[in-house]
Amino acid sequence: MANKGQAPDSTRRSERSRRAIYDAALSLVGEAGYAKTTIEGIAARAGVGKQTIYRWWPSKAAVLLEAFVDLSHQAVQGEVSLPDTGDLESDLKLVLRATVDELNDDATEAPYRALAAEGVIDPELAAAFVQNLLEPQLKLYVDRLRSAQDAGEVRADVDPRTALELLVGPLSHRWLLRTLPLTHAYADTVVDYALRGLAPR
Amino acid sequence: MANKGQAPDSTRRSERSRRAIYDAALSLVGEAGYAKTTIEGIAARAGVGKQTIYRWWPSKAAVLLEAFVDLSHQAVQGEVSLPDTGDLESDLKLVLRATVDELNDDATEAPYRALAAEGVIDPELAAAFVQNLLEPQLKLYVDRLRSAQDAGEVRADVDPRTALELLVGPLSHRWLLRTLPLTHAYADTVVDYALRGLAPR
Amino acid sequence: MANKGQAPDSTRRSERSRRAIYDAALSLVGEAGYAKTTIEGIAARAGVGKQTIYRWWPSKAAVLLEAFVDLSHQAVQGEVSLPDTGDLESDLKLVLRATVDELNDDATEAPYRALAAEGVIDPELAAAFVQNLLEPQLKLYVDRLRSAQDAGEVRADVDPRTALELLVGPLSHRWLLRTLPLTHAYADTVVDYALRGLAPR
Amino acid sequence: MANKGQAPDSTRRSERSRRAIYDAALSLVGEAGYAKTTIEGIAARAGVGKQTIYRWWPSKAAVLLEAFVDLSHQAVQGEVSLPDTGDLESDLKLVLRATVDELNDDATEAPYRALAAEGVIDPELAAAFVQNLLEPQLKLYVDRLRSAQDAGEVRADVDPRTALELLVGPLSHRWLLRTLPLTHAYADTVVDYALRGLAPR
DNA sequence: TAGTAACCGAGACGGTACGTCCCGTCTTCTG
DNA sequence: CAGAAGACGGGACGTACCGTCTCGGTTACTA
C-alpha cells in the first residue's frame, strides 16, 4: 500500500537547491513580507523548478520555517545556556532585555511574525515552530530557574515551566498582539513582579 | 462633477447586505477556515455583488473583524464588569477559567485565531482587533485590580496594567503558540504565582 | 437547474478582446507553428487574461478555427461562385490550379494544416472545420457540376457530390499526406481523368 | 575520448524493452488517445526508464509509428498483392471495400488517425508514415492497374499513380476530414466513376 | 577472470504550460 | 445611485510532462 504519490528519495536530494531555496525564501520574506512572497517567486529566485519545492515541502510556511531553523542553527553555536551569576533577578533582566531587543529587530521581525501567525492557525506548523525554534530557548529558562531553586532563590514547590511562562507570556502577549510597546522597562517590571511571587516568603 | 474614488454615501447603505455579509463571512470561516474563505465566496453566499464588499471594507480581515465585533456586541449585553466578591484570588480564578473555556470553544476558535493571526502580521488590523475586542475585556481586569488595590489586597505601587498581563500573558502564550494545553489547573496556578508577587509582603 | 459552471453572458463579451485573440492566435501559429503556440502565449500577446480565452473557447484548436473562419469571412466577400464559361474542363482546371496555389502558399499553410490535423483526431473540431471552411468551398463545385449536368456536359445520373470528391480527393490526399508534390500539371491530369469518367459516352 | 552526444550502440539494445515500449504505446493510444499519451506514461507502463525511450526515438510520434509499423509487419505476412481475377472493376471494389472496413475499425482507427494527423503537420514523420505504411499498400494498386493496362482494361496513356489517387483520394478525403460517412456503396461509386474515365473509349 | 564501458530502471532536476481560482476594477442593468 | 451580477486583465496556484541529468545495477565485450 503505497502512500499518496510515494515519498521521494531523499538520498538523491540536491543540497544545492535546498540551500538556494532557503536563501531565496528568507530574502524574499525580508524584502516583500510573507504574504507577498510566493512559491513561484522563491523558485524563480532560487533558480529552481517549482516542483522541487512542492516535492520537499508541503507549504510556503514549511519552507520558511525550515529556512529559519537552518538559519538559527547556524547563528547559535556555543551559546547553550543563560548566564548564571548567582543573582537570578539581574540574570533574567539581562536575558529578557535581550529578547525584547531581538523581537524589536527589524531584520528578523517579519519572518518571525509570519511563522508565529501561521502557527496560530495551523497546529502542525505551530508544533514544528515551537519544537524547533521556541522550545530550545524556553528550556534555557527552565534550567536557570531550576538552578535558582537549588540555590534557594525560588521556592521548591514552584513549577519552573509555569514560572517561565509568567516571565515570557507577558512579553509575547505584547509582541504578538501589539497591545502596548515592548521595552526594557517593561521587561524589568515583569521580572520584578513575577520574581516576588516566586521567591520564598 | 462627481469626485472620483470617493467615500460612498453611508446613509444609503443597505443594512440587509451588511448583515448578510457578516453572516456569510462568519459561517464560511467556521466551515472552511480563514485562508480558504474568499471575498468572492462571501459575496456569493451573501447574495451580494463583490463591489458591495469592496465598497465598504478594505480587506477580508476587516470584514471578518467587523463581523466578529458585531457578534460579540450582540453576545455581551449587561455583563460589564468582573465579579467582585472581595476575594481577588477566587474572582480571578473564576474569570480566567471562563476565559480558558472560551478559548477552547470550537465555535469561536477558528475565526478568533484567524483574526489574531492576521493581527500578528498586520499592525493596522491588530490595532482594530485590540481596540474593539481585546481591550474592553482587559479593562475589566484593570478595574478589578484597582479595586483590589483599594482593598489592600494588592500593593499600591503595582501597575495594574502590567499586573493584568502577568495573568493574561501566560494564557495567551499557550493559546496562540500551543506550547502546552490550556486548562483550569493552569489558570489557577498562574493566579497563585502572580498574586503572590502582587500581594503586600 | 444550472448547467455546469454556467454559460457566460455573451452580450457582455468584449469585442476588443475577441479581435485581439484572433490576431494573436493567427500570428503566433504563423510564426512558431501550431504545436508551439500556447494559450498562455496567445493571451499574453493579445494583452488578455487567460481566463478570457478559457471562458469562450474550449481549446486552442477552437480558438484558431474561429480566428481562421473570421479571417476567411473577411477575405471572401462577393466571390460566391465558380466561373462558368460553358467549358467545364477549363473552368475546373482554373479553379483547381488556384486551389493548388493556395494550398502551397506559405502564409496560410501552417494554420490550415494545424486545423486539418486537429480535425483528423477531434471529430467535433472536424465538424466545425468542415462546416465553416470546407463545405462552402465544396458547394461551389457541386453547383458548377449541376450546371454542367444541365448543359449535358456531365451525365445526369452522376452524383455531383461524389464527382466533386473525385476531383478534390486526389489533391487533398497529396497535400495532407505529402505523398507527392502538388502541381498544376497534377491538377490538370486529375481533371482530365475524372471528367472522362463523368462525361456522357 | 568518447564522442559526446553520440549514437548509442544498437547491438546492445534491449529487445525486451523495445517490445514493451511498442505494447505500452499502442495500448495507451488506444485507451486514452494520442494527445493524452505521454512518454512518461509509456515508460511507466512498459516498466522502462524514460531515457531508454529518449535514447532510441526522437519523439512520441516516432515511437508510435514504429510500433505501428511493427504491428502491421506482424499482421501482413504473405498477402503481397491485390487479387487479379481479370475483372478490374470487381477486384477494385473488393479491395476498396476492405479498406473502408479497415478505416472504420475501432481498434486501429485511433492510432492510425494519430499518425496521419501528426504527418499532416510534421513532414519528416509524414515521410516515414508514407514510406513504411502507406506506400507499400499503394504500390499494390499501381501493380494491379499496370496489369489492367496490359490487359487493355485501362488506356495505355494513363499514369497508374494518378489513377490510383483517383480511387484512393476520395476515400481518404472522407476519412480524414469526416465530411461524409465512408461506406461500401461510396467505394463502389468511386470505382464506377473513376474506371469509366480510365477505360478505353 | 578482472576491468570497464554501455545499457538499463529509476527518478530528481530546471523548466514550460496547463487549467483553475481569486484578486480588485470596471461596466451594465435593475429597483 | 447603491446594489446584484459578472466580464475583464492579471497573477499565483498546484499538477503534469518535457527533455536532461545523475545514480546504482546488470550485462557483455576487452585486456
Image (cartoon, coloured by chain):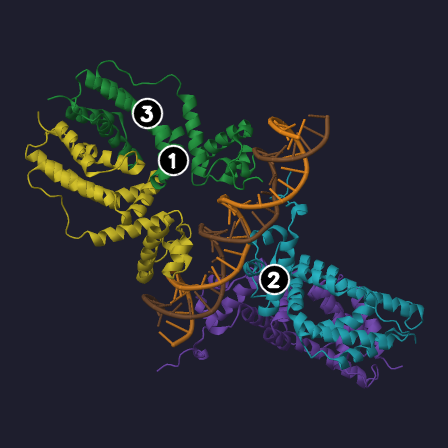
Chain colours: A cyan, B purple, C yellow, D green, E brown, F orange
Check the image and report above or below for F7 versus B133: above
| Picture quadrant of residue D109 | top left
Image-based side of B171 in relation to D190, left or right: right
Residue drawn at (73%, 81%) of the image = B143
**Percent coordinates x, y for residue A43 in the rendering:** 57, 58
- Give the Cα distance between marks 2 and 1: 45 Å
Q: SS class of the residue under badge 3? A: helix
Looking at the picture, does residue B157 appear above or below residue A117? below
- Residue wearing tag 3: D137
Pinpoint residue D60: horizontal percent, then vertical percent.
45, 38
Residue under circle 2? A24
Task: Work out whether residue B98 can be spotted.
Answer: no
Q: Earlier in the sequence, mark 1 or mark 3?
A: 1
Which element type, helix, strand or loop, lies under badge 1? Answer: helix
Q: Identify the residue shown where x is 35% and y is 47%.
A: C61
Residue B42 is labelled as none
